[in-house]
Amino acid sequence: MFTINTFSISKLNNAEVTGFYINVQKAITTADASKLGLTEVMTPYSSTLEKLIDQVYTTTGSEFTAAMLEADVKRDQTYKRIRLRLQMVEVAEDNPSIKAVKDVVKTHLLAKYTSKVPQLPYQEESAILQGFLFDLNDKLGSNGINALGISDDMAALEDANDSFIAAYNQRATERAEGDTGLTLKLRQEMYALYQQVCYCVLFLANSTLTENAEKAAACQAFIAVLNVLLADAKKRYNQRISNGSADEKGEGGEETIDGSDQNTGNEGSGGSSDGSGANNGSGSGSDAGDGGSGGTNHGSNQNNDDAGGSNSGSGTNDGSNQNTGSGSGSDNTSDPNKPSDGGVVNGDEVSF
């Protein structure tokens, strides 16, 4: 039995959920929509996604975006320059001050702050760089900093990081104030189309009919890719929350599809439900239609560890939690221009 992992995508903010749908589209294109039985749904999926991308990344752009990108380039370059200097401790052992901090540079700073830091999602990188500057001062001291000759670069890195954070917050405020509700409407439309995708691939992946054998194999492979995408989305969401960015909430608004029995769609990966009895959801479940704050219900009284909600036992979704699509979560902590570092499938499953 093939299943789709659970994660409530309605908890993602606008940029995160848009990036997720983009990755799903790429996965479908790579696998071939016709082999997945998704030829018909892909036309409205692609056109609606294009509108959502325009709304989130283009229409809502401003001078703050330009300032943000400029600051991000500067901080990335400066970080790389400082890290390169840290790597040079091996060739400067004749300097007593450098020799004194050699071990802490190798075992703590270089081990903790890797070359991948500039590739992290924007807000995660901001937090990491703040920690990096603190550790440089704490672990090296003024003697080590002066010996390595990085004091000017540290000041430049702090300035660029502060400039980025300021522009990021100003842009988020502008977007929240200017939201007309179109983003929420497009999110709801994309969610419904995403549910169709999950319904179809789960049905075919678990089909035992001989005529569906080729499509079943393709859908099984696609589900494996989709599970990794969901795990990555969950990982990035948890990182954002743990870094103190809980104010960047998703817009939610996705509705659940009830099954024929007492189950609602599991708040996992696909957001759909076939009402297969005592199972929690239908097997496709991406969102249980929570209001954006993770307040989803499970018909089988089984909690998922990151659902963020409570069980009603009735199989109905309250769908009215804290977020109603105010637009406050429209910013980018998982920007498509920032490469993904992958994810590990979390092991939670939706019963089909």
Image (spheres, grey):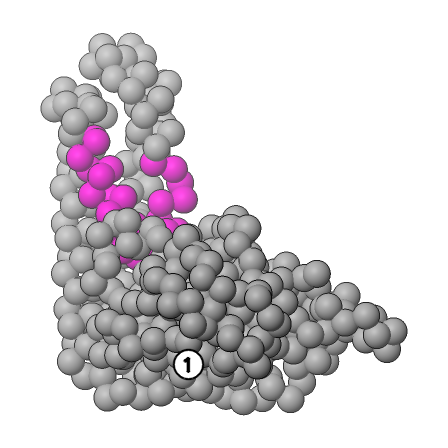
Residue 339 located within the stretch drawn in magenta: no
The spot of residue 45 in percent (x, y) is 53, 84
Q: Is residue 60 above or below residue 160?
A: below
The C terminus - image quarter: bottom right
Foreground pick, 253 / 226: 253
- Dominant secondary structure (helix, strand or loop) of the stretch shown in magenta: helix
The spot of residue 288 in percent (x, y) is 43, 72
Residue placed furthest toward the right: 210
Give the magenta-colored segment's residue range: 113-136
313 relative position to 206: left or right: left
Quadrant in the picture for residue 296: bottom left
- The residue wearing badge 1 is 255
Foreground pick, 149 / 162: 162
The N terminus - image quarter: bottom right
Secondary structure of residue under mark 1:
loop
Instruction: Answer yes or no: is residue 61 visible.
Output: no
Kindly identify the amino acid type of the residue bearing the numbered disc 1: Glu
307 relative position to 286: left or right: left
Residue at (42, 67) in percent of width and height: 313
132 relative position to 146: left or right: right
The spot of residue 276 in percent (x, y) is 61, 72
The spot of residue 310 in percent (x, y) is 34, 62
Foreground pick, 107 / 45: 45
Quadrant in the picture for residue 64: bottom left
Residue at (17, 35) in percent of width and height: 134
Residue 122 located within the stretch drawn in magenta: yes
Q: Is residue 317 above or below residue 220?
A: below
Bin the neighbour count of mark 1 within 10 Å (Cα to Cα): few under 14, some 14-19, many 20 and up: many
Quadrant in the picture for residue 145: top left
Instruction: Answer yes or no: is residue 322 visible.
Output: yes
Residue at (22, 83) in percent of width and height: 179
